[in-house]
Structure formats: structure tokens, C-alpha cells
Amino acid sequence: MQLENIKILGLSGASELTKGVCKILDIKPIDVTISHFADGEILVRPEEPVRHSNIIIIQSLIKPVNESVMELLICIDALKRASASSISVIIPYYAYARQDRKSKGREPITSKLLARLIETAGADHVAVVDVHSDQTQGFFEIPFDSVSATYVAVGEAIKNIDRSNLVVVSPDYGAVKRSRNIAKTLDVGLAILDKRRPKPNVAEILNVLGDIENKDCLIVDDMIDTAGTIVGACKVLKAKGAKSVTVTASHGILSDPATSRLTEAFENKWLDNLYLTNSIPTVVNFKNPHVKIVDLSEFIAGIIKVLRSGNASLSEYCSSITKKIQK
């Protein structure tokens, strides 16, 4: 898919990120008016003609999530009715991705519902950064790209770590495949945390599988919500003799009481460094010398360059980032 006559539009969940992307691409973003009526209804209106243009919307579905979702849907509808040639949506953080299956009777599959809403609104293409569940791509009937910024964050994290003493730690069994690939890429060891989750947002670490004694441990996760899992993992690793613990996460949701838990982990030296991308912009409000924010502007600008070229591959683009951190 080659996109010519590209115009970029950033919504509330990614306004600063969009500015960074457009600066790299030397493109002026479309001005957009987002109004809220007294009863809570939302109006989204691009402030320039988009007829016969290929539009790229950048929007993270951040808190308040439902408002961010409606803002995106309304914007797509506005662009469709304004005769845009195509509408591509880049979603740095895709909400509802954890509701991807029925684990109990009478539960919804909200991730699929959201996919249908985006399609029905009129999107032609969707790209999501580090979606929580890979099966989300099967919920879309339009072209869908799952792109990973994991190695962008990992690349920053390992700059100050001695690789000869590094071990990648999977935060749970569900993340073993991702953690094994990272360990293979870095040519280092792998350990696994034996975790069970008795109820939502509650996790118990039962054991550590693998040698982490006197090692520099790197936990790579896709998101940190209330931080209970991560802080518990760091505490166990240090108790088992880890020399240092560094965590990277693509999405810093940081719902209460995440910041207080992480601050406690830093103070008690369970956690040494935390790397979060700005897929969720509010992470910049977490002021702590041990927290580093990894800017995704260049990464997303690269995605847009691939879309614009028409003959490049997003998979190859992501692979090129991976290769940069290989020995």
C-alpha cells in the first residue's frame, strides 16, 4: 500500500507524540478541533480540507479510555464524510486488548468489539504497537499490522548493562516466547518467574526458574498497570540474589497505586531502573531519577515512511531495529 499526499492528524491521546513524528518527517500536522458538550458528547473536526488525501491518525486509547475510543471513532467518521481517500490509524496503545477471550461464562470479548467499531467507523488500515494479545489481529477484517517497539526500549536499557552478566527474565509463562527471543537476540541467559493470578490485578510469584544469583536481570513486559506483578517480581529476584533488576515496558498505564508501589521498589532497591515508552503520554509525569522515558517518535515516523514508500516491509523495518542491538 503506497500512500501519497499524506496528511497526519494527532488526537488527544497522542498529541505530543504526533508533534515529534511530524517534526522528524517534516510534515505539518492537521489542526483538529476537539470539543466537549455539556452532556459529555464529543465533536472532532479537522480544520483543513482532506478530500482525496491519505490520512494517518495517531491516537493512544488512554484514560479516560472510553472517551479516547469515541474520539477516535468520531474522527474517522468525520474524515470519511469529508471524502478522504484512505484512513490509516496508528494506535501506540490499544485498550481492551486484555479482554480477548471468555475466561468465564457471560463475559464479553471487548477487544473484538473495539476492532469492529473501528472498522465500521471507516478505517482502512490499522497498526498497533505491542498489542497485549497477538490474536487481536484476527479480530480485524481490514489490513492490520502488529508492530513491536520492545527492542527500542531494550536497546536503551542495555546501554548501561554488562551483557556478559545479563539474564532476561520472563515475568510469567505467557511472556516466555517474547523473553526467549530477546535472550536469543542478546545472546544471554533466560529465567522464568512462576506466577499465578488469583484475580484481576493481583499476582503471586511462586518461584524463579533459572540462574539469577549475582546476575543483572532484565524483565521485559508489554505493560505495567498497577505494578503489583512487576514490583513482586523485582522483590523476589533481589531476594534470590540478583545483582540488579532493570524493567522495560512498552506501555506505562500506571493505574493507582502503581507510582507508589514503584517508588517503594526504588527506595528498597528491589528495582534499579525502569524504562517506559511514551505510548501513553502520562508516563512523563512520573518524576523519578530511576525512570527513563523512551521516545517513540522516530519509531512511528519509520512506520509512516514504510507506508508512504509502498514497497517496503514493516516486518523488515522492525527486524532492522532488532539487529541494531545484536552483538
Image: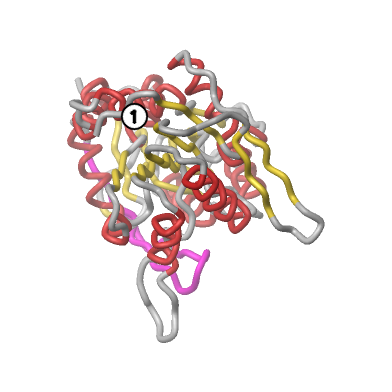
What is the quadrant of residue 284 in the picture? top right
**Could you say which quadrant of the image residue 55 lies in?**
top left
Residue 273 visible in the displayed image: no
The relative height of residue 324 versus residue 237 in the rendered view (above or below) is above
Residue type at the position of mark 1: Ile
Query: In this rendering, is residue 58 above or below 39?
Result: above
- Asked if residue 318 is among those painted magenta in the image, a careful observer would answer no
Q: Residue 254 or 125: which is nearer the viewer?
A: 125
Q: Residue at x 21, y 34 (%)?
A: 315
At x 38%, y 41%, the residue is 129
Q: Name the side, left or right, on which 308 lies relative to 39.
A: left
Residue hosting label 1: 303
At x 78%, y 61%, the residue is: 39
Q: Is residue 123 left or right of residue 266?
A: left
Q: Position of residue 291 (x, y in %)?
A: 56, 31
Residue 43 position, x and y percent, is 67, 49
In the depicted view, which residue is nearer to us: 19 or 148? 19
Q: Main secondary structure of the magenta part?
A: strand
Label 1 neighbour load within 10 Å: few <14, some 14-19, many 20+: some
Determine the residue located farthest toward the top in the rendered image. Answer: 26
* Whether residue 169 can be seen here: yes
Q: Could you tell me residue 179's position as x and y percent?
A: 27, 44
Depth check: give the residue in front, 323 or 230. 323
Queried whether the magenta region covers residue 199, the answer comes back as yes
Task: Say which of 2 and 138 sits in front.
Answer: 2
How many dots with numbers? 1
At mark 1, the secondary structure is helix
Quadrant, the N terminus = top left
Q: How is the image coloured?
A: secondary structure
Q: Position of residue 62 (x, y in %)?
A: 57, 48
Segment colored magenta: 189-208
Residue at 46% x, 27% y is 7
